Image (cartoon, rainbow, N blue to C red):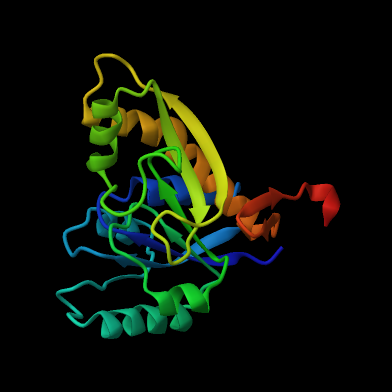
Amino acid sequence: MELKRLAVFVSGGGSNMQAIQDAILAGDIPARIVLMISGSSKAFALERAAKYAIPSIVINKTTHPDPHDRENAILQELRKAKVDFCVLAGYLSIIGKGIIEAYPDKIVNVHPALIPSFCGDGYYGLKVHEAVLSRGVKVTGATVHFVNEVTDGGPIILQKAVEVRDNDTPEVLQRRVMEEAEWVLLPKAIRLLCEDRLETDGRIVRIKDHGNH
């Protein structure tokens, strides 16, 4: 099988990107990361990319103040790298309409909650876990979904639940959700994507087994 070409979008530490790269190196994902786009010049993810010789570029409001220019710059980089799929792995910026239209059902995002709970505009990073704790829910988790023009509104691919404990802080809960759900789900979803095993029917995603090829 020919390796698929992935672009990974990050804004911070890049731990989800690391989980993807680890799965690739272990032979679990038939792909390679050919481009990393960072929304921050200070993201530790840039150091991770350099370690694996993954080409990376910073594109944000500082490099491209105009949203239209920013979107075009990203599209240009994706096309140049001949990207098959885009993965939002802790990316805190909104993906433009032009990018979504250029890669329909080819952009996935990981969200640190069980959609449709604690998602949408304003729910990102630690804010999600703060909201979970202040609401007193007993179970949270993570969701991998396709990206559309609605924030966290695309069809759901995979979900995994994570227990909320009485003495959790937002930081402790964030770490547990990453370790128990995000780092597990994201490589799994990318593998399904690369193996062409995801079928979208409206808002429903069906997973085809290997026998259905």
Quarter of image, res 72: bottom left
Q: Is residue 75 above or below residue 29?
A: below
What residue is rendered at 43% in x and 40% in y? 182
Please give left or right for residue 24 compared with residue 59 in the image. right
**Front-most of residues 55 and 170:** 170
**Front-most of residues 118 and 159:** 118
Please give left or right for residue 45 compared with residue 208 in the image. left
**Front-most of residues 60 and 96:** 96
Q: Where residue 5 sits in the image (x, y, percent)?
A: 54, 68
Q: Is residue 177 visible?
A: yes
**Front-most of residues 163 and 194:** 163
Q: Where residue 193 sits in the image (x, y, percent)?
A: 62, 57
Q: Where residue 174 sits in the image (x, y, percent)?
A: 30, 34
Q: Is residue 175 above or below residue 13?
A: above
Q: Where residue 27 sits in the image (x, y, percent)?
A: 60, 48
Q: How many marks?
A: 0
Please give left or right for residue 161 compared with residue 2 in the image. left
Question: Quadrant where the N terminus lies?
Answer: bottom right
Q: Is residue 146 above or below residue 143?
A: below
Q: Is residue 82 visible?
A: no
Question: Quadrant where the C terminus lies?
Answer: bottom right
Q: Is residue 185 above or below residue 74?
A: above
What residue is rendered at 30% in x and 22% in y? 136
